[in-house]
Amino acid sequence: MLNINDILNISSEAQFERAALELFAFQVKNCTPYKSYVEYIKVNPSSVDTLDKIPFMPISAFKNHKLYCGENEPEIVFTSSNTGGTDPSKHYLAQLDIYEACFTKAFEQFYGDISKINIYGLLPNYLQREGSSLIYMVDKLIKKSRGSGGFYLDNYEKLISELSEDKGDKILLGVSYALWDIAEQYAPKLENTIVMETGGMKGNREEIPKEQLHKILTTAFGVDKIESEYGMAELTSQAYSLGDGIFNTPKWLKILVRDINDPFDIKEHGRGGINIIDLGNLFSCAFIQTQDMGEIYQDNSFKIFGRIDHSEIRGCNLLVQ
């Protein structure tokens, strides 16, 4: 059985495919809802010998099935926000240290040694509920950072003051509507600061195109670009955009695209519905058919355009474009 060190040390496409096929064989045997789904769509597990043959579990299954195959009870259950009164998704995690290892290594791949950066978390709508994987991640990153920073609910003036006093490298990580509020009300010019937007507009302010929001924020904060994170409660890992809404992944996370009219027609590049293989989901389900629409480029970077028409809206889907 694969362990987290095997996953985090993947360095090639060949290694990824071997690990994914091994994890599929384990999960289709031990995760009962996934096994039932594979049987329902009449896929013989022994015939799955390439990535494009792996069945992807519709993400809605996380709402009403326990997708879990750990030997012991899960250490934590993360839940999605349920904007609009929908049932939240539940992600059962066997070991928190697996989650921490994944998000720490992915973050440092894109942003370097966390101990040299301060994190300022402006995540009010997440702070006001339990079970948020985003809050758990940011809290741990803050504790690993170089000493200042923290969470800020709605005291914008305190946040701006502390950002100004901190002369070192820092990241302001916030939900869309709160960053927009600060930009509109204060327009503080930030120095040595990466601004990272994590979605979360629904139900708080009007929806505007992502490019328009980023233009407002760059002008107000005096920064060259707005960076982003793509993640969700059903994942153990994250992808990051260093600007322009183009995301890249760590080696153990792969984005594929499916034909929106034929969910079993899966390709590595092109435009369509987004499927995700997250090998960090060792003891839940690593193969997820999301409700997001996007495009995957030849270099395996990708862009998210938004929800597929008629999909259920979920507030916990971070950084949709």
Image (cartoon, grey):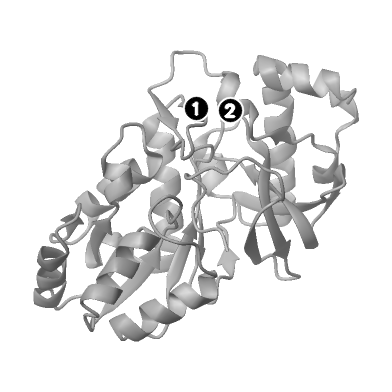
Q: Image point 49% across, 27% down: which residue?
A: 90
Q: Quadrant of residue 221?
A: bottom left
Q: Residue type at mark 2: give it.
A: Phe
The Cα–Cα distance between marks 2 and 1, rounded to whole angstroms, is: 6 Å
Neighbours of disc 2 within 10 Å: few (<14), some (14-19), many (20+): many
Image coords of residue 18 (percent x, y): 73, 42
The C terminus - image quarter: bottom right
Disc on res. 40: none
On the rendered structure, is 65 left or right of 229?
right
Q: Secondary structure at mark 1?
A: strand
Q: Residue type at mark 1: give it.
A: Lys
Image coords of residue 77 (percent x, y): 42, 25
Nearest the camera: 315 or 8?
315
Q: Image point 12% across, 67% down: which residue?
A: 157
On the rendered structure, is 171 left or right of 208?
left
N-terminal label among 2 and 1 = 2
On the rendered structure, is 243 left or right of 279?
left
Dots 2, 1 in contact, CB < 8 A = yes
Depicted 204 relative to depicted 161: above or below? above
Image coords of residue 223 (percent x, y): 34, 84
Q: Secondary structure at mark 2?
A: helix
Disc on res. 90: 1
The N terminus - image quarter: top right
Nearest the camera: 68 or 8?
68
Disc on res. 62: 2
Nearest the camera: 207 or 133?
207
Image coords of residue 254 (percent x, y): 66, 52
Regarding residue 1, the answer to whether it shows in the image is no
